[in-house]
Amino acid sequence: MIDTPIKIQSVNTRLQLRIAVGAMFFMAGLSFSSWASRIATVQQTMGLSDAALGAVLFALPVGLMCSLPFSGWIITKIGSRRLLIIALLVYSAALVSLGLAQNTFQLIICLVAFGFSSNAVNISVNTQAVATEEAYQKPILASFHGLWSLAGFTGAGIGTFMIAHDITPFHHFVLMLIVIAIGVVIAARYLKDDKVANAGPVFVMPDSSLVKLGIIAFCSMICEGAMFDWSVIYFKKVVLAPTAMVGIGFTAFMATMAGGRFVADWFAHRFGLKRTLQVSGSLTATGLAIAVAFPYIYTAIAGFLLVGAGVSSVVPMVYSAAGKSKTMQPGVALAAVSTIGFLGFLVGPPVIGFIAGIATLRASFVLIAMMGLSVVIVSSKAKLDA
């Protein structure tokens, strides 16, 4: 049933397509957050030190980076619809394998597979989102990313429940696999079949506009990655927050990042892509500047709230613009921009740690603020709005 292509023009309505793509985003977020919620459990079960866990977790971005050229190639062969169906099922199966891992080597292999399938899902689901946006003729892509963020909160809540009731990661992940598989079967028939007979060249050198979009994503994803990896440490070592409040900065960041994605489409439709990116970068830089200049609990929380609002719309807006490329197919263009942007996740955390080691953590956060300012500068010079 799920392999039968259905033309959006004849059977599906725009609303059905939007709901189906939104469901895929939600299930992708549910898979990732399910794993994230049980990392501490896996660490304790395997007896991994913090350093060992950090080394093991690096396998996930390695798998993701390995998937980038593959995803750009395979999406031109089978289309984003079929790739999304296959990749999301593999992604959830890889989640279950993480619960089955018995030693560090097995966990690393499973994490590579998890990261590899994660990126295949990312490229294909965003390609579907771009097609949906074209059908609506207005910005809606950020709302899909908002659903991913909402799934993050949902997955974290489910994970907390599982931990409280002493349910093993394996049984937890099997339940998520069942939920995701049912969702895929229901939603798959409403996705757009975008496979073409003559897909054209797969590898095309990105033009300057795509490179600039990649740089914007790179700068913003450094900021986003810094919040994920260093916000709790910043509140602990710089803000000197009580133990019970060291996570409040990250919570504040996540709340405005999720909420911002549900208003970003309206803002972009009203004020344009360039102005949206300029405001986003300004909010990020301002928020980090406040947190650095006034490292106290309430001012730092306010700063992190601004950072979350700032980074919320950048990646969705950049993906939307990349999907409209005149020189590359949407899936290939998204893969090219993702490759440049995701380097921010890989480069950012080690650089922050290096600067913190030779100077201070506050000094490293000044660099992150500069990345937010760079989003403003590059987006101001790029030709983004038609």
Image (cartoon, rainbow, N blue to C red):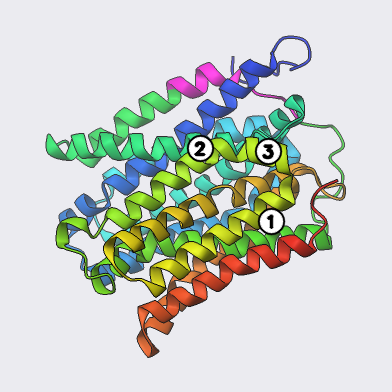
Query: SS class of the residue under badge 3?
Result: helix
Query: SS class of the residue under badge 1?
Result: helix
Percent position of residue 219, x then y: 59, 65
Q: CA distance from mark 1 to mark 2?
A: 20 Å
Q: Which label lies toward us, 1 or 2?
A: 2
Tell me which corner region of the image, top left, top right, bottom left or bottom right, holds residue 217: bottom right
The answer to whether mark 1 and mark 3 are in CB contact below 8 A is: no
- Magenta run includes residue 265: no
Does 265 sit left or right of 135 as displayed? Answer: left
Q: Which residues are magenta?
A: 182-194
Query: SS class of the residue under badge 2?
Result: helix
Q: Is residue 11 shown to the viewer in this render?
A: yes
Q: Amino acid at mark 1?
A: Val
- Dot 3 corresponds to which residue? 127
Q: Earlier in the sequence, mark 1 or mark 3?
A: 3
Residue drawn at (28%, 54%) of the image: 248
- Dot 2 corresponds to which residue? 146
375 shown above or below 201: below
The answer to whether mark 2 and mark 3 are in CB contact below 8 A is: no
Q: Is the residue marked by circle 1 packed among few (<14), some (14-19), or many (20+) residues within 10 Å? A: many
- Dot 1 corresponds to which residue? 337
Residue drawn at (29%, 67%) of the image: 296
Q: CA distance from mark 1 to mark 3?
A: 12 Å
Q: Earlier in the sequence, mark 2 or mark 3?
A: 3
Q: CA distance from mark 2 to mark 3?
A: 16 Å
